Amino acid sequence: MPYAEKEYYIGVFQGHIPEEEISKYLNQASRHIDSLTYNRIVGRGISNLTEFQKDILKEVCCEQAEFEYNNREIFDMILQGYSINGVSMQFGESWNVSIQKGIPMKRDTYEILSQTGLTCRLAV
């Protein structure tokens, strides 16, 4: 089950993913959040998190789903970079995108997720 419901994404977050694809991207974002939080949410159960943590997870899930949808063509590329006539493009970390555990995420979204305390590498 995704950390944000389709209704929340449409009504509160007011995202731009086509309605028939919202569930797919919310589920994908939730699985990526699980990886970034070392499956602590799955291990503890979402009902054992604080309301603050649950609210953050909803927001981050929607942000990540939107980010992954908007950049789906780039993320599906096999290449790390290319060059045409002296102009090159590289894919990877940049000033506004972080890659943690192979998952690209906007840096500010990752910082919001970090506020939950669930991304710390040390056992919590």
Image (tube, rainbow, N blue to C red):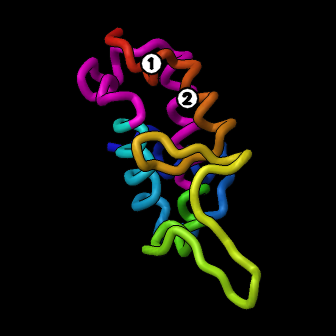
Residue 120, disc:
1
Overall secondary structure of the magenta section? helix
Quadrant of the image for the C terminus?
top left
Left or right, residue 65 beside residue 11: left
Q: Secondary structure at mark 1?
A: loop
Q: Amino acid at mark 2?
A: Leu
The label on residue 113 is: 2
Q: CA distance from mark 1 to mark 2?
A: 10 Å
Q: On screen, 106 above or below 87? A: above
Q: Residues within 10 Å of mark 1 (few under 14, many from 20)?
A: few
In magenta, the rendered stretch is: 36-65
Q: Where does the image place residue 15, in percent across and percent down from the top left?
A: 65, 56
Q: Residues within 10 Å of mark 2 (few under 14, many from 20)?
A: many
The image quarter in which residue 101 lies: top left
Can you say whether 70 is above or below 26 in the image? below
The part of the image, by quadrant, that contains residue 70 is bottom right
Residue drawn at 60 percent across, 56 percent down: 67
Closer-to-camera residue (99/87): 87
Q: Position of residue 12 (x, y in %)?
A: 66, 43
Residue 114 figure quarter:
top right
- Above or below 72: residue 29: above
